[in-house]
Image (spheres, rainbow, N blue to C red):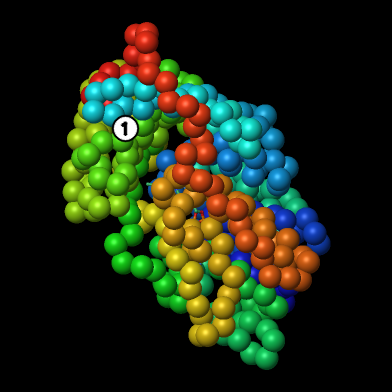
Amino acid sequence: MDYDVIIIGAGPAGLTCGLQLAKAGKSCLIIEQREELRGKVCGDGLSSHCMQVLKKINIQEDELVSLGGKKIYRNITSNFGQLEQRYYCKSKEYENYAFGLSRDVFDPYLLHLARMAGAEVRLGWKVSKIEKYNSEYVIDSTFKTKKVVLACGAMGGKKLGVLRPENLPFGISARVFGDCNLASDAFYFKYDWQYGNGYAWLFPVGEKLWNYGVWSADKQKNINNLFKQLEQRLKHTYFSSIHYDRQPKGALIGATKGKIKNNLLPCIGDCDYIVCYESGEGISFAIESGYHQANAIINDMEAETVSIPIRDAFCGEVKKLDKEPLVRQDL
Ligand SMILES: Cc1cc2nc3c(=O)[nH]c(=O)nc-3n(C[C@H](O)[C@H](O)[C@H](O)COP(=O)(O)OP(=O)(O)OC[C@H]3O[C@@H](n4cnc5c(N)ncnc54)[C@H](O)[C@@H]3O)c2cc1C
Protein backbone atom coordinates (compact mmCIF):
# COMPACT_ATOMS: atom_id res chain seq x y z
CA MET A 1 0.00 0.00 0.00
CA ASP A 2 1.75 3.14 -1.25
CA TYR A 3 0.88 6.72 -0.37
CA ASP A 4 2.32 10.15 -1.11
CA VAL A 5 2.06 11.02 2.57
CA ILE A 6 1.30 9.13 5.78
CA ILE A 7 0.27 11.10 8.84
CA ILE A 8 0.43 9.51 12.27
CA GLY A 9 -2.31 10.78 14.58
CA ALA A 10 -5.87 11.94 13.88
CA GLY A 11 -6.14 14.95 16.17
CA PRO A 12 -6.80 18.41 14.75
CA ALA A 13 -3.21 18.66 13.45
CA GLY A 14 -3.16 15.37 11.54
CA LEU A 15 -6.71 15.70 10.24
CA THR A 16 -6.10 19.24 8.96
CA CYS A 17 -2.90 18.20 7.27
CA GLY A 18 -4.65 15.22 5.65
CA LEU A 19 -7.60 17.36 4.61
CA GLN A 20 -5.40 19.89 2.82
CA LEU A 21 -3.27 17.23 1.14
CA ALA A 22 -6.31 15.32 -0.08
CA LYS A 23 -7.86 18.51 -1.44
CA ALA A 24 -4.67 19.02 -3.45
CA GLY A 25 -4.98 15.50 -4.91
CA LYS A 26 -2.23 13.83 -2.87
CA SER A 27 -2.82 10.24 -1.81
CA CYS A 28 -2.75 10.34 1.91
CA LEU A 29 -3.27 7.98 4.83
CA ILE A 30 -3.96 9.11 8.38
CA ILE A 31 -3.32 6.41 10.99
CA GLU A 32 -4.92 6.71 14.43
CA GLN A 33 -4.56 4.39 17.40
CA ARG A 34 -8.00 5.07 18.83
CA GLU A 35 -11.02 3.14 17.55
CA GLU A 36 -13.12 6.29 17.69
CA LEU A 37 -12.32 9.97 18.19
CA ARG A 38 -13.95 10.45 21.55
CA GLY A 39 -12.81 11.20 25.06
CA LYS A 40 -9.90 13.56 24.31
CA VAL A 41 -8.85 15.54 27.38
CA CYS A 42 -9.36 19.14 26.38
CA GLY A 43 -11.07 22.37 27.41
CA ASP A 44 -13.03 22.22 24.13
CA GLY A 45 -12.35 25.91 23.46
CA LEU A 46 -11.72 27.26 19.94
CA SER A 47 -9.97 30.57 20.55
CA SER A 48 -10.57 33.74 18.58
CA HIS A 49 -7.28 33.09 16.79
CA CYS A 50 -8.57 29.62 15.97
CA MET A 51 -11.66 31.08 14.32
CA GLN A 52 -9.42 32.75 11.77
CA VAL A 53 -7.33 29.66 11.27
CA LEU A 54 -10.50 27.64 10.61
CA LYS A 55 -11.47 30.03 7.84
CA LYS A 56 -8.21 29.19 6.10
CA ILE A 57 -9.39 25.60 5.80
CA ASN A 58 -12.89 26.71 4.80
CA ILE A 59 -14.68 25.92 8.03
CA GLN A 60 -17.21 28.68 8.65
CA GLU A 61 -18.77 29.53 11.96
CA ASP A 62 -22.31 28.58 10.88
CA GLU A 63 -21.01 25.02 10.54
CA LEU A 64 -19.79 25.17 14.14
CA VAL A 65 -23.14 26.51 15.28
CA SER A 66 -24.96 23.72 13.46
CA LEU A 67 -22.70 21.25 15.30
CA GLY A 68 -23.88 22.73 18.60
CA GLY A 69 -21.00 25.16 19.20
CA LYS A 70 -21.48 28.12 21.53
CA LYS A 71 -20.26 31.57 20.64
CA ILE A 72 -18.43 33.23 23.52
CA TYR A 73 -18.11 37.00 23.67
CA ARG A 74 -16.84 37.68 27.15
CA ASN A 75 -14.17 36.63 29.58
CA ILE A 76 -15.02 36.90 33.23
CA THR A 77 -11.89 36.82 35.32
CA SER A 78 -11.78 36.38 39.04
CA ASN A 79 -8.59 37.19 40.86
CA PHE A 80 -8.36 37.28 44.64
CA GLY A 81 -12.02 38.17 44.84
CA GLN A 82 -11.88 40.95 42.24
CA LEU A 83 -14.02 40.38 39.21
CA GLU A 84 -12.96 41.70 35.87
CA GLN A 85 -14.61 41.47 32.53
CA ARG A 86 -12.76 41.40 29.22
CA TYR A 87 -14.31 41.40 25.82
CA TYR A 88 -13.22 39.50 22.78
CA CYS A 89 -11.33 41.17 21.17
CA LYS A 90 -9.70 44.50 20.78
CA SER A 91 -7.00 43.53 18.34
CA LYS A 92 -7.96 43.85 14.69
CA GLU A 93 -5.92 40.74 13.99
CA TYR A 94 -8.40 38.52 15.82
CA GLU A 95 -12.12 37.84 15.86
CA ASN A 96 -14.08 39.39 18.70
CA TYR A 97 -15.36 36.07 20.00
CA ALA A 98 -14.35 32.47 20.52
CA PHE A 99 -16.25 29.18 20.37
CA GLY A 100 -16.91 26.37 22.78
CA LEU A 101 -17.42 23.05 20.98
CA SER A 102 -17.01 19.53 22.31
CA ARG A 103 -13.99 17.72 20.85
CA ASP A 104 -16.23 14.65 20.63
CA VAL A 105 -18.03 16.58 17.89
CA PHE A 106 -15.22 18.70 16.46
CA ASP A 107 -12.65 15.96 15.80
CA PRO A 108 -15.14 13.61 14.08
CA TYR A 109 -16.26 16.56 11.94
CA LEU A 110 -12.68 17.15 10.78
CA LEU A 111 -12.39 13.42 10.14
CA HIS A 112 -15.53 13.53 8.02
CA LEU A 113 -14.18 16.50 5.99
CA ALA A 114 -10.82 14.78 5.46
CA ARG A 115 -12.52 11.59 4.25
CA MET A 116 -14.87 13.54 1.99
CA ALA A 117 -11.84 15.22 0.43
CA GLY A 118 -10.33 11.80 -0.31
CA ALA A 119 -7.98 11.13 2.60
CA GLU A 120 -7.92 7.55 3.85
CA VAL A 121 -8.21 7.27 7.62
CA ARG A 122 -7.41 4.06 9.47
CA LEU A 123 -8.64 3.95 13.05
CA GLY A 124 -7.56 1.48 15.71
CA TRP A 125 -3.93 1.10 14.53
CA LYS A 126 -1.11 2.12 16.84
CA VAL A 127 2.05 2.82 14.85
CA SER A 128 5.10 1.37 16.55
CA LYS A 129 7.79 1.31 13.85
CA ILE A 130 8.96 3.69 11.15
CA GLU A 131 11.79 2.51 8.92
CA LYS A 132 13.52 4.22 6.05
CA TYR A 133 14.58 2.28 2.97
CA ASN A 134 16.26 4.29 0.19
CA SER A 135 13.96 7.27 -0.23
CA GLU A 136 10.86 5.54 1.12
CA TYR A 137 9.45 5.08 4.58
CA VAL A 138 7.83 1.86 5.72
CA ILE A 139 5.37 2.01 8.58
CA ASP A 140 4.90 -1.11 10.70
CA SER A 141 6.15 -3.22 7.79
CA THR A 142 2.83 -2.53 6.07
CA PHE A 143 2.45 0.92 4.55
CA LYS A 144 4.90 2.64 2.21
CA THR A 145 5.20 6.34 1.65
CA LYS A 146 7.47 9.11 0.40
CA LYS A 147 6.74 11.35 3.37
CA VAL A 148 5.77 10.85 7.01
CA VAL A 149 4.29 13.55 9.22
CA LEU A 150 4.11 13.03 12.98
CA ALA A 151 0.92 14.40 14.50
CA CYS A 152 0.79 12.13 17.51
CA GLY A 153 0.13 14.72 20.20
CA ALA A 154 1.86 15.49 23.49
CA MET A 155 1.67 11.97 24.87
CA GLY A 156 1.87 9.74 21.82
CA GLY A 157 5.21 10.21 20.16
CA LYS A 158 7.69 8.88 22.70
CA LYS A 159 8.13 5.46 21.14
CA LEU A 160 8.48 7.08 17.74
CA GLY A 161 11.34 9.23 18.98
CA VAL A 162 9.58 12.47 19.87
CA LEU A 163 11.49 13.72 22.88
CA ARG A 164 9.85 15.62 25.70
CA PRO A 165 11.28 17.82 28.40
CA GLU A 166 10.65 16.88 32.00
CA ASN A 167 8.07 18.56 34.18
CA LEU A 168 5.52 19.44 31.55
CA PRO A 169 2.38 21.13 32.80
CA PHE A 170 -0.58 18.94 33.46
CA GLY A 171 -4.29 19.64 33.16
CA ILE A 172 -7.52 17.97 34.21
CA SER A 173 -10.92 18.69 32.76
CA ALA A 174 -14.45 17.29 32.71
CA ARG A 175 -17.43 17.90 30.48
CA VAL A 176 -20.86 17.96 32.06
CA PHE A 177 -24.49 18.27 31.06
CA GLY A 178 -26.30 20.56 33.46
CA ASP A 179 -28.53 23.49 34.27
CA CYS A 180 -26.06 26.23 35.04
CA ASN A 181 -26.92 29.67 36.37
CA LEU A 182 -24.01 31.41 34.64
CA ALA A 183 -24.27 33.41 31.41
CA SER A 184 -23.72 31.17 28.41
CA ASP A 185 -21.84 33.72 26.31
CA ALA A 186 -18.96 34.02 28.77
CA PHE A 187 -15.72 32.22 29.47
CA TYR A 188 -14.99 32.12 33.21
CA PHE A 189 -11.39 32.13 34.33
CA LYS A 190 -9.78 32.02 37.70
CA TYR A 191 -6.14 33.02 37.93
CA ASP A 192 -5.06 32.48 41.48
CA TRP A 193 -2.04 31.70 43.62
CA GLN A 194 -3.31 28.21 44.30
CA TYR A 195 -2.90 27.21 40.64
CA GLY A 196 0.66 28.50 40.46
CA ASN A 197 1.42 29.15 36.84
CA GLY A 198 -1.99 28.07 35.58
CA TYR A 199 -5.69 28.70 35.89
CA ALA A 200 -9.16 27.21 36.22
CA TRP A 201 -11.94 27.65 33.68
CA LEU A 202 -15.61 27.07 32.99
CA PHE A 203 -17.52 27.78 29.78
CA PRO A 204 -20.29 26.32 27.59
CA VAL A 205 -19.37 23.91 24.79
CA GLY A 206 -22.85 22.92 23.59
CA GLU A 207 -26.51 22.96 24.61
CA LYS A 208 -26.50 22.66 28.41
CA LEU A 209 -23.00 21.29 28.00
CA TRP A 210 -20.11 22.80 29.98
CA ASN A 211 -16.40 22.19 30.26
CA TYR A 212 -14.44 22.95 33.39
CA GLY A 213 -10.93 22.19 34.52
CA VAL A 214 -7.57 23.31 35.83
CA TRP A 215 -4.01 23.23 34.63
CA SER A 216 -0.90 24.08 36.50
CA ALA A 217 2.76 24.16 35.59
CA ASP A 218 4.17 23.99 39.08
CA LYS A 219 1.58 22.25 41.20
CA GLN A 220 1.55 18.89 39.47
CA LYS A 221 1.46 16.93 42.69
CA ASN A 222 -1.58 18.83 43.91
CA ILE A 223 -3.51 19.07 40.73
CA ASN A 224 -5.95 16.29 41.57
CA ASN A 225 -6.84 18.05 44.80
CA LEU A 226 -7.18 21.40 43.05
CA PHE A 227 -9.50 19.85 40.54
CA LYS A 228 -11.62 18.17 43.21
CA GLN A 229 -11.98 21.44 45.11
CA LEU A 230 -12.96 23.32 41.97
CA GLU A 231 -15.45 20.66 40.97
CA GLN A 232 -17.17 20.57 44.34
CA ARG A 233 -17.57 24.34 44.33
CA LEU A 234 -18.90 24.44 40.79
CA LYS A 235 -21.35 21.61 41.36
CA HIS A 236 -22.80 23.13 44.45
CA THR A 237 -22.74 26.78 43.48
CA TYR A 238 -23.61 27.00 39.80
CA PHE A 239 -25.43 23.86 38.72
CA SER A 240 -28.89 22.76 39.76
CA SER A 241 -28.52 19.46 37.93
CA ILE A 242 -25.38 17.87 36.58
CA HIS A 243 -24.05 14.66 35.05
CA TYR A 244 -20.85 13.80 33.23
CA ASP A 245 -20.58 13.82 29.48
CA ARG A 246 -16.90 13.01 29.98
CA GLN A 247 -15.50 11.98 33.34
CA PRO A 248 -12.59 14.04 34.73
CA LYS A 249 -9.37 13.09 32.97
CA GLY A 250 -5.83 14.45 32.99
CA ALA A 251 -3.20 14.95 30.31
CA LEU A 252 0.14 16.55 29.66
CA ILE A 253 0.07 19.89 27.94
CA GLY A 254 2.63 20.48 25.19
CA ALA A 255 5.63 18.53 23.89
CA THR A 256 8.75 19.27 21.96
CA LYS A 257 10.62 18.75 18.72
CA GLY A 258 11.94 15.25 18.20
CA LYS A 259 14.09 13.21 15.90
CA ILE A 260 13.69 9.72 14.58
CA LYS A 261 16.88 7.79 14.00
CA ASN A 262 18.67 10.94 12.90
CA ASN A 263 16.12 11.61 10.17
CA LEU A 264 14.22 14.67 11.09
CA LEU A 265 10.56 14.02 10.43
CA PRO A 266 8.15 16.91 10.36
CA CYS A 267 6.11 17.20 13.56
CA ILE A 268 2.91 19.21 13.85
CA GLY A 269 0.53 20.21 16.64
CA ASP A 270 1.29 19.24 20.23
CA CYS A 271 3.94 16.86 19.03
CA ASP A 272 5.96 19.88 17.94
CA TYR A 273 5.30 22.77 20.19
CA ILE A 274 5.96 23.33 23.87
CA VAL A 275 4.48 26.71 24.69
CA CYS A 276 0.85 26.50 23.58
CA TYR A 277 -0.33 25.72 27.11
CA GLU A 278 0.26 29.31 28.10
CA SER A 279 -2.32 30.66 25.73
CA GLY A 280 -4.57 27.59 25.96
CA GLU A 281 -4.61 27.60 22.16
CA GLY A 282 -3.36 24.15 21.34
CA ILE A 283 -6.09 23.47 18.82
CA SER A 284 -5.43 26.58 16.80
CA PHE A 285 -1.70 25.81 16.71
CA ALA A 286 -2.46 22.21 15.72
CA ILE A 287 -4.69 23.28 12.85
CA GLU A 288 -2.39 26.02 11.67
CA SER A 289 0.70 23.84 11.74
CA GLY A 290 -1.17 21.04 9.92
CA TYR A 291 -2.25 23.53 7.27
CA HIS A 292 1.26 24.92 6.77
CA GLN A 293 2.84 21.48 6.73
CA ALA A 294 0.43 20.32 4.03
CA ASN A 295 1.17 23.39 1.92
CA ALA A 296 4.88 22.82 2.33
CA ILE A 297 4.50 19.24 1.09
CA ILE A 298 2.28 20.32 -1.80
CA ASN A 299 4.88 22.91 -2.81
CA ASP A 300 7.67 20.46 -2.08
CA MET A 301 9.47 22.75 0.32
CA GLU A 302 10.27 23.03 4.01
CA ALA A 303 7.28 23.98 6.17
CA GLU A 304 7.23 27.68 6.73
CA THR A 305 7.47 28.92 10.27
CA VAL A 306 4.07 28.73 11.87
CA SER A 307 2.81 31.87 13.47
CA ILE A 308 2.30 31.27 17.14
CA PRO A 309 -0.74 32.57 18.98
CA ILE A 310 0.33 35.06 21.59
CA ARG A 311 -0.76 34.66 25.14
CA ASP A 312 -3.39 37.33 25.48
CA ALA A 313 -4.54 37.36 21.89
CA PHE A 314 -8.07 36.59 22.93
CA CYS A 315 -8.74 39.59 25.09
CA GLY A 316 -9.06 43.28 24.83
CA GLU A 317 -8.74 45.67 27.71
CA VAL A 318 -9.55 44.62 31.25
CA LYS A 319 -12.61 46.31 32.63
CA LYS A 320 -13.79 46.24 36.24
CA LEU A 321 -17.43 45.25 36.52
CA ASP A 322 -19.60 48.01 37.90
CA LYS A 323 -22.89 46.07 37.93
CA GLU A 324 -24.10 42.94 39.64
CA PRO A 325 -21.34 40.39 38.99
CA LEU A 326 -22.22 37.42 36.83
CA VAL A 327 -20.14 35.06 38.90
CA ARG A 328 -19.65 34.69 42.60
CA GLN A 329 -16.30 35.52 44.04
CA ASP A 330 -15.44 31.96 44.94
CA LEU A 331 -15.22 30.70 41.34
C1 LIG B 1 -6.63 19.76 30.19
C2 LIG B 1 -6.41 20.33 28.81
C3 LIG B 1 -7.22 21.37 28.36
C4 LIG B 1 -7.03 21.91 27.07
N1 LIG B 1 -7.89 22.88 26.65
C5 LIG B 1 -7.72 23.42 25.39
C6 LIG B 1 -8.64 24.38 24.89
O1 LIG B 1 -9.65 24.72 25.52
N2 LIG B 1 -8.40 24.92 23.66
C7 LIG B 1 -7.32 24.56 22.91
O2 LIG B 1 -7.12 25.11 21.82
N3 LIG B 1 -6.46 23.59 23.35
C8 LIG B 1 -6.64 23.01 24.57
N4 LIG B 1 -5.81 22.01 25.00
C9 LIG B 1 -4.74 21.57 24.12
C10 LIG B 1 -5.31 20.70 22.99
O3 LIG B 1 -6.05 19.62 23.52
C11 LIG B 1 -4.15 20.16 22.16
O4 LIG B 1 -3.25 21.21 21.88
C12 LIG B 1 -4.64 19.55 20.85
O5 LIG B 1 -5.41 18.40 21.08
C13 LIG B 1 -3.43 19.16 20.00
O6 LIG B 1 -3.88 18.56 18.83
P1 LIG B 1 -2.94 17.52 18.08
O7 LIG B 1 -3.65 17.12 16.82
O8 LIG B 1 -1.57 18.06 17.98
O9 LIG B 1 -2.82 16.28 19.08
P2 LIG B 1 -3.95 15.32 19.67
O10 LIG B 1 -5.27 15.95 19.68
O11 LIG B 1 -3.39 14.83 20.97
O12 LIG B 1 -3.98 14.13 18.63
C14 LIG B 1 -2.89 13.22 18.52
C15 LIG B 1 -3.45 11.88 18.06
O13 LIG B 1 -2.38 10.99 17.75
C16 LIG B 1 -2.77 9.69 18.16
N5 LIG B 1 -1.56 8.88 18.31
C17 LIG B 1 -0.56 9.05 19.21
N6 LIG B 1 0.39 8.11 19.06
C18 LIG B 1 -0.01 7.33 18.02
C19 LIG B 1 0.55 6.19 17.39
N7 LIG B 1 1.71 5.66 17.78
N8 LIG B 1 -0.14 5.62 16.36
C20 LIG B 1 -1.33 6.14 15.94
N9 LIG B 1 -1.91 7.21 16.53
C21 LIG B 1 -1.25 7.81 17.53
C22 LIG B 1 -3.51 9.93 19.46
O14 LIG B 1 -4.38 8.85 19.78
C23 LIG B 1 -4.28 11.21 19.13
O15 LIG B 1 -5.57 10.97 18.63
C24 LIG B 1 -5.99 21.43 26.26
C25 LIG B 1 -5.17 20.37 26.70
C26 LIG B 1 -5.39 19.82 27.96
C27 LIG B 1 -4.53 18.69 28.41
Location of the N terminus by quadrant is bottom right
Q: Which residue is mark 1?
A: 190
Along the viewing direction, whichever of 1 and 166 lies nearer the viewer: 166
Q: Quadrant of the C terminus?
A: top left
Taking 50 as reference, is 219 above or below it?
Answer: below
Q: Disc 1 residue type?
A: Lys
Q: Position of residue 238 (x, y in %)?
A: 30, 20
Residue 77 figure quarter: top left
1 lies above or below 219: below
Q: Is residue 11 left or right of residue 278?
A: right
How crowded pointer 1 is (Cα within 10 Å; few <14, some 14-19, many 20+) is rated as many
Q: Is the residue marked 1 within 8 Å of ligand 1, measured from its CB?
A: no
Q: Position of residue 270 (x, y in %)?
A: 48, 58
Residue 292, can we see it? yes
Secondary structure found at label 1? strand
Q: Is residue 137 left or right of residue 179?
A: right
Q: Residue furthest top?
A: 323
Residue 235 seen anywhere in this rendered image of the structure:
no
The answer to which quarter of the image holds residue 324 is top left
Closer to the camera, 252 or 15? Answer: 252
Where residue 182 appears, as percent x and y from the top left, is 38, 18
Q: Residue at x 52, y 67 (%)?
A: 125
Between 231 and 299, the residue placed more toward the observer is: 299
What residue lies at 45% left-to-right and 66% top-to-bottom? 256
Q: Picture coordinates of residue 89 (x, y %)?
A: 55, 29
Q: Residue at x 43, y 62 (%)?
A: 255
Identity of the residue drawn at 30% across and 52% down: 217
